[in-house]
Amino acid sequence: MGFIEDEWGQGAAEYILLFGGVIVIAIAALFVYDSYFSGANTLNAAQDMDKVRSSIKV
């Protein structure tokens, strides 16, 4: 009946769930920012800053 009191497996399962959640979030971020990673859209910091500045002006 010692296996009932053993909590080592529970800790391992929690780590697996934690790392699985991080991986899912990372994959979702890759899908959201796919245009930046595909190379189809070159990064242009100056153009991006101009867009941000123009959207903030009231």
Image (cartoon, grey):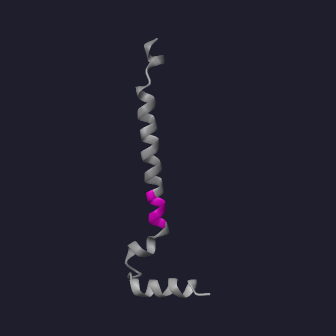
Task: Locate residue 35: give its quadrant.
Answer: bottom left
Residue, x 47% and y 49% (percent of image)? 21
Residue segment shown in magenta: 26-31
Q: Is residue 46 above or below residue 34?
A: below
Residue, x 40% and y 26% (percent of image)? 8
Q: Position of residue 16 (x, y in %)?
A: 42, 40
Q: Residue furthest top?
A: 1
Between 54 and 2, the residue placed more toward the observer is 54
Q: Is residue 16 above or below residue 41?
A: above
Q: Position of residue 37 (x, y in %)?
A: 39, 72
Between 36 and 54, the residue placed more toward the observer is 54
Residue, x 44% and y 65% (percent of image)? 30
Between 37 and 18, the residue placed more toward the observer is 18
Q: Is residue 20 above or below residue 13?
A: below
Quadrant in which the C terminus is drawn: bottom right
Q: Position of residue 18 (x, y in %)?
A: 45, 44
The magenta stretch spans residue 28: yes
Q: Residue furthest right?
A: 58
Q: Position of residue 49 (x, y in %)?
A: 45, 84
Numbered disc total: 0
Magenta segment, prevailing SS (helix, strand or loop): helix
